[in-house]
Structure formats: structure tokens, C-alpha cells
Image (tube, helix red, strand yellow):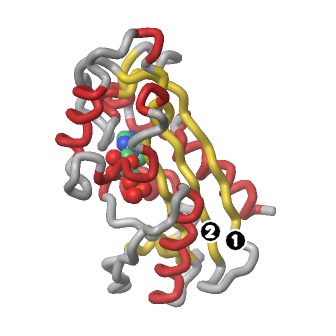
Amino acid sequence: MKKIILASNNTGKIREFNAMLTGIYEVVSMSDMNVKEVPEIGLTFVENALIKARNASEQSGLPALADDSGIVVDALNGAPGIYSARYAGNHGDDEANTQKILDNMAQVADAQRSARFWCAIVFVEHANDPTPIIIQRGWEGEIMREKSGENGFGYDPIFYVPTHKKSSAELSSEQKNNISHRGKALQALLSELKN
Ligand code: IMP
């Protein structure tokens, strides 16, 4: 089976990718290969995913898969967007990030609470690959007024999924992976790779 490095240290994401790639690729992590993170200095999800994929491939010598994702809230002019992981200040503080959105949305009417998860996935065959595969997918929903559910990670407990009438943290991982921004992007990437 072909080896691929997953350019992420986010345990929630790694869990989802592993579930979706089992039997297709042998996935190794950044820590397996001693890969150091690079600053995400892009202004878009795509730029940041490319930066992470090229860095992981360069340091490991393996083909790399990177995802840059986040939540885009219309009433907050698209925030937190590419800054989703560090919205409240500390990188990866899901609790504080979620609370900050709830606070900033407290006065926003029900009809104006639309939001989407966004995911850019990039695959590079090697660090200088001039033809990376780039896929972007979104997942439409609404910001809830309080948290609900224990599954998933990040903003899942405050993301209402209208098709299922529950938060994304109340979906099973299989349900989420079938319809989420990351699940759809990865499915598209895999069919692209087959070609
Ligand atoms: P990244 O690792 O820089 O791409 O940051 C992604 C951040 O966006 C995560 O830390 C989460 O806060 C948020 N995020 C991305 N995808 C999801 C998801 O599927 N559920 C909940 N939060 C997500």
C-alpha cells in the first residue's frame, strides 16, 4: 500500500482522515516522520493547505495530503475563516473558540445565522509538485444558540445541520464523514487520484 503523510497535528482531523483512508493508503503522521510545522501565512484555505502539504512532503520525502479548514459565519463577515483554530487567541482552544462565536452571535436573529464549514484539500506528489490536486468543498448550516452533542471536535457542537435537524456533534462519525466539507472533499480527491 502506498505511503502518504498527513500534514496535520489536529487529532480530530487525523481521526476522520484515518477512518476515510483505511485500506487505501498507509497514512503516516507528522510526528511519525519528525516533521516540524510551518507558519500558515496564506490568506485563503487553499494557500495554507498548499504551504502545509509542501512542507510535510519536503521534510518527509513522501507524497503529502493537507487540509486547511474552518468555519465561515456570514453575520461575522466570514470570520473566523482561516483563523478558526485560533479565533479566541490560543491555537486549538475549541472551548474558547466556540464560546467566542456564541457571544458574538448572541444578538443575531435566527434568520441571519447561516454559516458553512469549508475545507481545502491539497495533494502533492513531491514538495515542488507543479500540478498539485486542489479540492474545495463546503457544508451549509447555522450557528446554534448553545452547544449540543459530544461527538466530533472544534465547532461541531454549535453547528446546526438542517438536513439532519441536529448539531454536527450529534451525528455519528460515519454520518458526518458522509456529508461534511472534509468528507466530500476527500471523496472527490480520491476519485481524482484514481484517474
Ligand atoms: P486548521 O487545522 O488550521 O485547518 O484549523 C481548522 C480549525 O477549524 C479547527 O481547529 C476547528 O476549530 C475548525 N474546524 C475545521 N473542520 C471542522 C469540523 O469538521 N468540525 C468542527 N470544527 C472544524
Q: Nearer the viewer, residue 185 or 93?
A: 93
Question: In the figure, residue 44 lies in which quadrant?
Answer: bottom right
Mark 1 element type = loop
- Residue located at (45% from left, 68% from top): 41
- Residue located at (33% from left, 59% from top): 10
What's the CA distance linking mark 1 and mark 2?
A: 6 Å
61 vs 167, left or right, is right
Q: Looking at numbered disc 2 in the image, what kind of residue is underneath it?
A: Phe
Q: Nearer the viewer, residue 80 or 120?
A: 80
Mark 1, residue position: 132
Q: Mark 1: is the Cβ under 8 angstroms from ligand 1?
A: no
Evaluate if marks 1 and 2 touch, with contact meaning CB atoms under 8 Å apart: yes
Q: Looking at numbered disc 1 in the image, what kind of residue is underneath it?
A: Pro
Question: In the figure, residue 9 lies in which quadrant?
Answer: bottom left
81 vs 133, left or right, is left
5 vs 1, left or right, is left
- Residue located at (33% from left, 19% from top): 144
Residue 94 image offset from top left, x and y in percent: 23, 45
Residue 164 image offset from top left, x and y in percent: 47, 17
Q: Nearer the viewer, residue 195 or 74?
A: 74
Label 1 or label 2, whichever comes before in sequence order: 2
Question: In the figure, residue 47 lies in which quadrant?
Answer: bottom right
Q: Is residue 61 above or below residue 175?
A: below
Residue 56 image offset from top left, x and y in percent: 47, 79
Mark 2 element type = strand
44 vs 151, left or right, is right
Mark 2, residue position: 123
Outermost residue toward the right in this view = 195
Residue 89 image offset from top left, x and y in percent: 22, 53
